[in-house]
Amino acid sequence: MSLDLFLRSISHRFPAREFDLDGASLAGLTVNDGVVLGSSFRKCDFAGVTLTGMMFNKCDFSGASFAGGSLDKCMFVECQAPDTDWRKARFAQSTFMMSDLSRGDFSEAQLAQTTLMRCTMTQAFLRGAVLSQSAVMDCVLDNIVLDDASLVNAAITQADLRSAQFNGMRCDTILFSECDLSERDLTGLTLARANLSGAKLNRANLSGVDLSGSVMVGASLLGADLSGAIAPSTLFVKADMRAATLRSANLTQCIFQEARLDGCDLSGARLDMAVFTRASAKSASFRGAEMPYALMHHAKVDGSDFSASRFLRTDFHCASTEGSLFVGQHGRALETVPERAIAELYDSSRVTPYSGAR
């Protein structure tokens, strides 16, 4: 079938079915509001093309070039597009679903409000790409290259990033939910305001990283190195941080509620107004930590070392401190208030209201 017939079908709003346009040139053309089904565009030249409102289903773009093209409100569903050239292409409100984008070159591409869902992007190249308000969801990202990329209000979720390259990657308000970054060196990243809920960061190197205002609810940071990290107002609720290192980290106003910090090294850390309610921090080191107004309500800190730490109304109400060391600490801590402890046992669901004399 000819290119002219294909373009006429699109212009008349007829679905273009099973066209074979391998090697054809659509460079510089403008194509709008069409539906293309089961067609082949292998090694086609789409350089500089303008596509608006196009929907491609089960099409083959292997080895094609969209370099410098503009794709607005386009959708690619179950398409094959390995080894495709997307350099400097501009995507707006477009979607890729269940498509193969392996080894695709997205260098310096701009993706705005664009979604890639359940795609294969093995060895895809996004050096210098800009992702703004875009999402990469449940995709295969083995050996993906994100060097010098910029991610602003973007999301990468449920991805294994252990082999990803992201030297010089810039992040601002990014979602890394349920991603695996275990054993990665993340010291070159800025993760302020990042959401890493449910992420795996086991034995990752986050020393000195800016994590200000980040969310790590339910994250796994087993043996991770956060020494010297800048992480004020970060949420570590229910995070697993056993044997992690947080020496000299700025953890002011952090929330460690119900977190697991057993064997953690928090020596010299700033813990002003930090909340450890119901956290487990057994055999942890708080040596020389700054802890004014920290809340340790119902925390388990048995066997922990608080030597030379500084207290100021640090509240250990109902905390378990058996075997802990409090030697040479400065300031005073608040102890358990018996009346309050009794009141906290009150369960309204188990109390029958008094209805008066019978």
Image: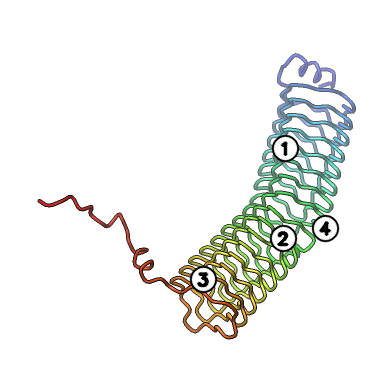
**Residue for point 43% across, 73% down:** 336
The residue pinned by badge 4 equals: 167
The residue pinned by badge 2 equals: 162
Image height of 47 relative to 263, above or below: above
Q: Position of residue 88 (x, y in %)?
A: 87, 39
**Residue for point 86% across, 45% down:** 107
Q: Position of residue 38 (x, y in %)?
A: 72, 30
Q: Report the side of 6 relative to 275 (left or right).
A: right
**Residue for point 70% across, 35% down:** 95
The residue pinned by badge 1 equals: 114
* Neighbour tally class for label 2: few under 14, some 14-19, many 20 plus, Cα within 10 Å: some
**Residue for point 57% across, 66% down:** 240
Circle 1: residue type: Thr
The residue pinned by badge 3 equals: 280
Which corner quadrant of the image does residue 325 belong to?
A: bottom right
3D distance between C-alphas at marks 3 and 2: 29 Å
